[in-house]
Image (spheres, coloured by chain):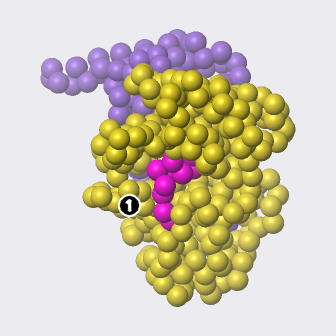
Chain colours: A yellow, B purple
Amino acid sequence: MFNFAFHRPTSLEEAQRLKAEIPGARLIAGGTDVLVKLKKGVPCPSDLISVRNLRELKQISGGEVITIGASVTVSELLASPLVQQELPILLEACTRLACVQIRNVATLGGNLCNASPCADLAPPLLVLEANMRILGTAGERRVPLRSFMVAARENCLAPDELLVAVEVSRPRAGSCGVFLKQARVSMDLALASLAVMLEPDGDTRAWRIAAGSVAPTPIRLARTETLLSTAPDTSAALPTAQALADEEVRPISDVRASATYRRQLIRVFLGRAVAALQTGRSA
Amino acid sequence: MSTVRLTFQINRQAAELEVSPGALLVEVLRGPLGLLGTREGCSRGECGACTVLVDGLPVNSCLYPALEVEGRSVLTIEGLSEPGQKLSPVQEAFVERGGIQCGFCSPGMILSTHALLASNPAPSDHEIRAALVGNLCRCTGYVQIVESVQRAAELRARAREGVSHE
């Protein structure tokens, strides 16, 4: 039993107002990160504000820009025909996230706001160039996901702000992507993960690559992307790309894996992803 | 801290009780409601022993604030068999095929199976194992559990057939 006051606002405006008015209040959605942290001894906030059931945060809508509410659960993403059709790379990451019990409550917004280096949904959304729609006292603003996660377990939200939705431009026709993850057992956190997208861009093709669990936040591998996107022969460029990716990642050794192993995983994943996307096989 | 009134359905019955705002669902089930079939294992959402169904979906009750079941329907192992039934088909299958040894994981394992079969009446081995990834068993090695789920699917299908022939 915890010693917090539990607020259940019934509208987005009320949730934002409570967040702005109560110093030190924390938002909670599915609770699979917040409550685990409290159980591990992180000091308990005086107030938790639940956004789990806010209707405004539960919508998924399509069009040229796909908007997914922050409180949509991972199971709801998996069941969404729009996500299945338009964002298979995000769908793949959802299937690899923890277990049924967690997926039924864990939310998209929670996974990103928690800003863990190993957040499973971050690498696919980084290569999809997602934008975060944020509501504060002064109104709404948009921040690219790549600048939303500022440090390990730290996001850029001000005390009066909350995440409303994640926006993704519908990928161009002919785009394809893969998400690869290595974990000790299937429900475990990623030792390393890699999302790779290949998008037709006029006469050329643009590669976008993001990695998880190999830096303080999930990161884009910008130099590796440029190298592959400008290489006349992708297969010939692969060894150089793998060496470059190895320079771009900054993994640590911890209880789950050594830095050396994580580096090796990224090299192997990049090789598999490039091979799969070039031939249209699954990685 | 003052308590808050909580109203929800537990095992098809209306329940109304006063709970602390910081109480978790597993604490309310095992405490004031006296439903000891729901186990608390790791307490961190990894072992699945505390699995219950909220509006039909498996969740870890150790990570579920009690106040969040307001207006919802919760099913625990005590409510699984229908009125007049001794055991549900899933429970019968676990007994028959040795899917139970020490029994600590069984309520969670059985509720996860119940939810799986409700959405997928004839799951493959792979689908069974994927659905039970969040339920750890330290006794059986899972082989008998997977067999129990297959058997439960058969019993359930047979029961449905019986109903449709009446």
Work out whether residue A138 can be spotted: yes
x and y percentages locating residue A115 in the rendered image: 66, 57
Mark 1: few/some/many CA within 10 Å (<14, 14-19, 20+): many
The part of the image, by quadrant, that contains residue A173 is top left
Q: Is residue A249 part of the magenta span, yes or no?
A: no
Chain letter for the residue marked with disc 1 in the picture: A
Q: Would you say A40 lies left or right of A98 here?
A: right
x and y percentages locating residue A164 in the rendered image: 47, 69
Say which of B97 and A247 sits in front.
A247
User: In the image, is residue A140 above or below residue A182?
Assistant: below
Q: Residue at x 34, y 60 (%)?
A: A65
**Furthest residue toward front:** A232
Q: Is residue A126 part of the magenta span, yes or no?
A: yes
Residues in magenta?
A122-132
Q: Would you say A81 lies left or right of B79 here?
A: left
Say which of A89 and B13 sits in front.
A89
Label 1 belongs to which residue? A67
**The C terminus of chain B: image quadrant:** top left
* Kind of residue indicated by mark 1: Thr
Q: Secondary structure at mark 1?
A: strand
Say which of B24 and A102 sits in front.
A102
